Image (cartoon, rainbow, N blue to C red):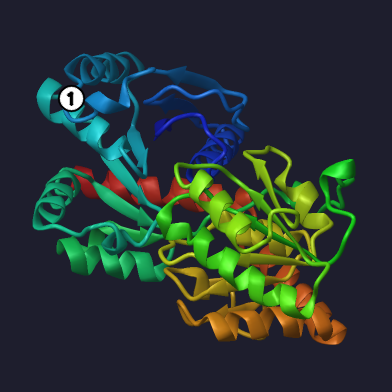
Amino acid sequence: MKIIQVIQKPQMRGAEIFSAQLSEHLNILGHQVILVAVFPGIAKLPFRGRIIQMNRKQALRFCDVAGWYSFAKLVNEFNPDIIQANAADTLKSTIFSKLIFRWNHPVVYRNANLISGFINTRVKLWFNKFLLSHTAGVISVSEICNVDCIRLFKYPENKTVVIPIGIENSYFDKKETPGDLIPSKKPVLLSVAGMVPEKNHKGLIRIFSRIKMSFSEAQLVLIGSGRLENEIRDLAISLGLQDSVHFMGNRNDVNHFMNDSNIFLLPSLVEGLPAVILEAMASNCPVVAYDAGGISEIVRNRETGMLIPVNDVEMFVNAVLEVLTDEYFRNTLVSNACTLVKQQFDNESIAVRFADAYNVILNQEVH
């Protein structure tokens, strides 16, 4: 099978990292995969195959006729069996190119988030429904995200499938921690997310300030960047946390940090099914998260992690304190979580499921 995987840009974000890993495993299975990045980026993604950087201007994403033509030219040259648009602006780029330059190759959309969390106007609803109406199928990252897509856009249920994200087997190997980058004071609480509103870093800083009341030496490590970074820094300073909140920026050695952190925190308000939770579980780092999007399909409360109702700060703080103080409970969570990930979320088997889904979609197109 010949496949084009379209991503937003080369960046160390979950959607792009998983798309690259998926492409790698599809290649290993014998398929021909090209990874196409719409916008410029500098991150080195984990894919050894052909990567095409279109380097389009994001400001022109609604009127980039030249970019859509370039993509159409690539499609006609490579002649793929199927094209997968992976979240964000990738669907606009592929569908506009398809409609304007009239190529007929099927497009499947990978729905990696709870879309209703971002649709706040009728125009956005109509526009995204229009784009999806020209797809051959939707592959959602979780059951909750799939139901959300079907209900929100009245998308045909028989054209949808749920396939979760996966992780690499290498995450189960104990890694040497990155030296003095890990705070020497304990406990170390870790969060990995882009600094955008839905990831709720400001809420996390306030949660951490409460945890410091019980664990004065506690340290918070933040991996990621984004447009809210300065505001988050200012909030940490205003609460007197500037010496215990560590901003590490974007990194490609996240699992190293997980191996030496006491708890992984994810207080997101909107989510799909983030791979970073699986990475934490595989690294024996217990998870405390808000019950957003498809997180409940991985984090089973008090079994594989601590699942907290969204915005319940008191319960979130108490959950962190319980995991920190009850070693037996913590070890139980870690053991259950690691077993779950090993059994259900390895990328080798996930890639086979994607290939099977592509074949089903292609058969539907023929008939």
Q: Is residue 267 visible?
A: no
Expressed as whole percent of the image width and height from the top left, the position of residue 42 reads: 55, 23
In the displayed structure, 268 sits above or below 315; it is above
In the displayed structure, 25 sits above or below 4; it is below
Residue positioned 54% across, 44% down in the render: 18
Q: Which residue is mark 1?
A: 103
Label 1 secondary element: loop
Decide if residue 91 is on the left or right side of residue 167: left
Q: Nearer the viewer, residue 182 or 206?
A: 206
Residue positioned 16% across, 24% down in the render: 63
Q: Is residue 20 visible?
A: yes
Quarter of the image for residue 122 reads bottom left
Expressed as whole percent of the image width and height from the top left, the position of residue 114 reads: 35, 62
In the displayed structure, 107 sits above or below 118; it is above
Quarter of the image for residue 327 reads bottom right
Q: Amino acid at mark 1?
A: Trp
Image quadrant containing the N terminus = top left
Question: Across the whole image, how many numbered discs are drawn on residues?
Answer: 1
Expressed as whole percent of the image width and height from the top left, the position of residue 211 reads: 70, 75
Expressed as whole percent of the image width and height from the top left, the position of residue 27 reads: 56, 32
Q: Nearer the viewer, residue 62 or 59?
A: 59
Quarter of the image for residue 301 reads bottom right
In the displayed structure, 250 sits above or below 321; it is above
**How busy is the neighbourhood of tag 1: few (under 14 within 10 Å), some, or many (20 plus)?**
some
Residue positioned 65% across, 69% down in the render: 208
